[in-house]
């Protein structure tokens, strides 16, 4: 990848971060939390996007960001107060800004009508809400993309010498010199020179520090205050000196900034990877309209003691794969040593124990690197809430809890679509209209709550609403009408609620852009199941519904208990196991001719023979002498599973069986054991939910 492509990719990665920061801040605005720090962070996010976009000639993005930034500057300067209507306008503008960023990345044009409508709304805020006010800078804005191409803009007036040196904090806050210096050309004829004399050799260079300074000569009709206004936002994070001269210099050619991108390429060659420190050659000619130059100043670490780097996810995925192979080989080594007859406490056995400990620590560290907070996914749902509420004529707001909860990046990438389906359904089917809510004493604005937390090695995501709840009579009637349920069926409330997940089921009276096609919740359940997760529903009429998603923290490695069943080696996830005990006659109670229950601590639990459930044998064997494994599903259901014996507990590498073979009832995935054989990983929830086949008439 060339330097320019690398910098462009970095720009879009940083745009996503800035958009997430913008969304967080604007939601705080909506909730009445528009304090100075939040306002500054929102302004900084839009300002940074605008600065980088100009470097790549994304003129539509720059134009819109400028209009957005102007309104935020009004808020920052206390010329505009944020109320609910203002916050909604800003949130809509943030949605369009995100569309423009993604359009710039994909090369697709934005929706001109929506862009212009949003700019008019922003201008209405800027002009005090009077959309008939005199034309402003929005109307005839013709942006030249932000580059270091300082052609003459004016003549005459005073000449100022400007000395500008950013400090490390300015970079850490996401600000860049390029947009600031480029603003000088709006005031007049600017000539800029870069002083890189303080840049140390590469082996001494600290990427958290700032070594560059710029000097500029500006011929302008503007005042010194106008110049200082350009640097106002970073005034505490830089050294700035402005001196006025009687007349512009008449002789001598000024120094200018060199082609930073070519020097980045040179550094990239020296370092063997994309360079992070901006270095330029002094007094070289300045190229015109280089799209990469505004992104030279990359973010510095947030503090002097913490540094970060960017890494391709492909490299990280390969690392996780290698760790998986390391776990498998460590298990194989343990198997060979065990078969060799070495006694515990021998040097080799001790070394193997240490290798196992180190392998686990490496695996945990790699999983921590892959882990990402779920907050950005939750924040994306804010737009869904706004759009669906507007389309349905309802009023809704989003509340997010546990946004810092971390989950494997692969799960993060695949959870957004199911969440979108569920949030849309919660508004369309769950929330009442403002009039209906008002009539029953509820607030006109419904609340959609997203929460995330860790529990027992899994992540629990809950989507709830304070709407009408599941209308069970309507659900059952529609299911009977579609032939999904027999007319004389007698179903419990929980069973009726679960009809929502049947393929082809929908309670919508008509097909709309939002619902009615009968694919939403069925798709959700399949998507969650493909991630090794489960979904459950709880609903109370008149008070709302709660959907609970249980997902694995990672799709790569888990702790498992290896058991023997009918000469087959199987694996049970440790997180699902409550306890294990020997099957003794005094705790077993027959239930019919071929079934048993287990009585433990005054609780009676059905006993399922794993071999029968998987079709490995036709009927349950005499359970006495076997091993009973008490397991619990994420929904709280319990079942006692019968295995022939327990082999050991071990960390295992999860391999997809569905991708390589196909879906199997009761099987979640597969793994490779220490002896090289493949073992199947049991789907505990499926075993709890499934009814055992009836082999009473089998030969």
Image: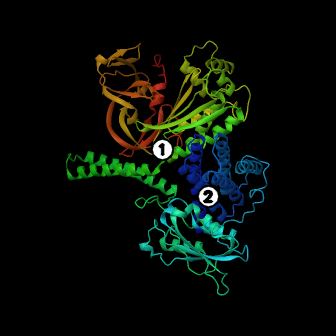
**From the viewer's perspective, is 356 left or right of 482?**
left
Q: Residue at x 44, y 55 (%)?
A: 319
Is any atom of residue 292 visible in this view? no
**From the viewer's perspective, is 615 left or right of 478?**
left
**Front one among 163 and 157:** 157
Dot label at residue 47: 2
Residue 210 appears at what percent x and percent y?
48, 69
Instruction: Judge depth for marks 2 and 1 and give the one in front.
Output: 2
Residue 440 appears at what percent x and percent y?
63, 20
Asked which secondary structure carries label 1, the reply is loop
| 374 is higher (above) or lower (below) than 506 | below
Q: Which residue is drawn at 69% across and 25% down?
A: 435
Is any atom of residue 647 visible in this view? yes
Proximity of marks 2 and 1: CB atoms separated by less than 8 Å: no
Binning the other alpha carbons within 10 Å of mark 1 as few (below 14), some (14 to 19) or many (20 upward) gives: few
| 392 is higher (above) or lower (below) than 205 | above
Q: Residue at x 48, y 75 (%)?
A: 199
| 689 is higher (above) or lower (below) than 561 | above
Q: Mark 1 points at which residue?
A: 404
Asked which secondary structure carries label 2, the reply is helix
If the image is split into quadrants, where does the C terminus sit?
top left
If the image is split into quadrants, where does the N terminus sit?
bottom right
**Front one among 593 and 655:** 655
Dot label at residue 477: none
């Amino acid at each position: 990848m060339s330097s320019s492509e690398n910098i462009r990719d970095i720009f879009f990665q940083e745009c996503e971060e800035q958009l997430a920061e913008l969304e967080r801040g604007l939601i705080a605005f909506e909730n009445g939390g528009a304090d100075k720090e939040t306002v500054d962070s929102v302004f900084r996010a839009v300002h940074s996007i605008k600065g980088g976009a100009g470097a790549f000639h994304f003129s539509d993005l720059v134009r819109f960001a400028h209009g957005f930034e102007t309104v935020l500057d009004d808020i920052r300067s206390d010329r505009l107060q944020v109320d609910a209507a203002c916050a909604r306008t800003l949130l809509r503008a943030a949605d369009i800004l995100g569309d423009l960023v993604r359009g710039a990345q994909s090369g697709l044009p934005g929706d001109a009508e929506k862009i212009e409508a949003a700019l008019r709304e922003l201008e209405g805020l800027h002009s005090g809400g009077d959309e008939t006010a005199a034309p402003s800078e929005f109307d005839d804005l013709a942006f030249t993309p932000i580059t270091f191409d300082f052609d003459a803009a004016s003549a005459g007036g005073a000449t100022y010498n400007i000395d500008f040196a950013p400090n490390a904090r300015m970079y850490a806050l996401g600000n860049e010199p390029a947009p600031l210096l480029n603003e000088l050309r709006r005031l007049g004829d600017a000539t800029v020179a870069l002083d890189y004399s303080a840049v140390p050799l590469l082996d001494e260079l600290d990427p958290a520090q700032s070594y560059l300074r710029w000097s500029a000569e500006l011929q302008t009709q503007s005042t010194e205050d106008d110049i200082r206004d350009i640097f106002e936002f970073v005034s505490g994070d830089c050294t700035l000196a402005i001196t006025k001269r009687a007349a512009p210099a008449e002789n001598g050619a000024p120094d200018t900034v060199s082609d930073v991108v070519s020097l980045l390429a040179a550094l990239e060659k020296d370092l063997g990877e994309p360079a992070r420190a901006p270095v330029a050659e002094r007094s070289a000619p300045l190229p015109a309209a280089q799209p990469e130059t505004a992104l030279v100043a990359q973010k510095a670490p947030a503090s002097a003691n913490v540094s970060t780097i960017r890494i391709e996810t492909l490299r990280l995925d390969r690392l996780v794969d290698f760790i998986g192979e390391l776990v498998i080989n460590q298990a194989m080594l343990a198997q060979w040593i065990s078969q060799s007859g070495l006694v515990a406490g021998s040097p080799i056995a001790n070394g193997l124990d240490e290798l196992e400990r180190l392998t686990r620590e490496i695996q945990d560290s790699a999983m921590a690197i892959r882990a990402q907070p779920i907050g950005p996914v939750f924040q994306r749902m804010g737009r869904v809430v706004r759009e669906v509420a507007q389309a349905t004529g309802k009023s809704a707001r989003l509340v997010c809890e546990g946004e810092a909860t971390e989950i494997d990046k692969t799960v993060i990438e695949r959870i957004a679509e199911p969440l979108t389906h569920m949030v849309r359904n919660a508004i369309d089917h769950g929330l009442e209209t403002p009039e209906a809510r008002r009539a029953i004493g509820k607030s006109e604005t419904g609340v959609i709550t997203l929460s995330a937390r860790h529990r027992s090695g899994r992540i629990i995501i809950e989507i709830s609403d304070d709407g009408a709840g599941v209308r069970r009579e309507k659900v059952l009637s529609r299911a009977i009408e579609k032939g999904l349920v027999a007319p004389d069926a007698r179903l419990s409330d929980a069973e009726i609620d679960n009809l929502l997940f049947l393929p082809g089921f929908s309670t919508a009276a008509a097909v709309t852009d939002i619902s009615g096609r009968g694919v939403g919740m069925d798709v959700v359940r399949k998507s969650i199941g493909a991630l090794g997760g489960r979904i459950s529903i709880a609903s109370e009429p008149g008070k709302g519904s709660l959907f609970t998603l249980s997902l694995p923290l990672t799709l790569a490695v888990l702790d498992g208990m290896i058991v023997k069943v009918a000469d087959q080696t199987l694996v049970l996830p440790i997180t699902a196991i409550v306890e294990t005990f020997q099957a003794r006659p005094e705790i077993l109670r027959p239930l019919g001719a071929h079934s048993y229950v287990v009585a433990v601590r005054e609780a009676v639990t059905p006993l399922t023979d794993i071999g029968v459930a998987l079709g490995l044998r036709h009927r349950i064997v005499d359970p006495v002498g076997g091993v009973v494994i008490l397991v619990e599903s994420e929904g709280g259901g319990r079942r006692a599973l019968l295995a022939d014996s327990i082999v050991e507990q071990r960390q295992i590498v999860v391999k997809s069986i569905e991708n390589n073979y196909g879906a199997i009832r009761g099987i979640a995935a597969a793994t490779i054991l220490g002896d090289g054989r493949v073992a199947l990983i049991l789907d505990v929830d499926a075993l709890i939910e499934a009814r055992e086949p009836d082999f009473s008439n089998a030969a």
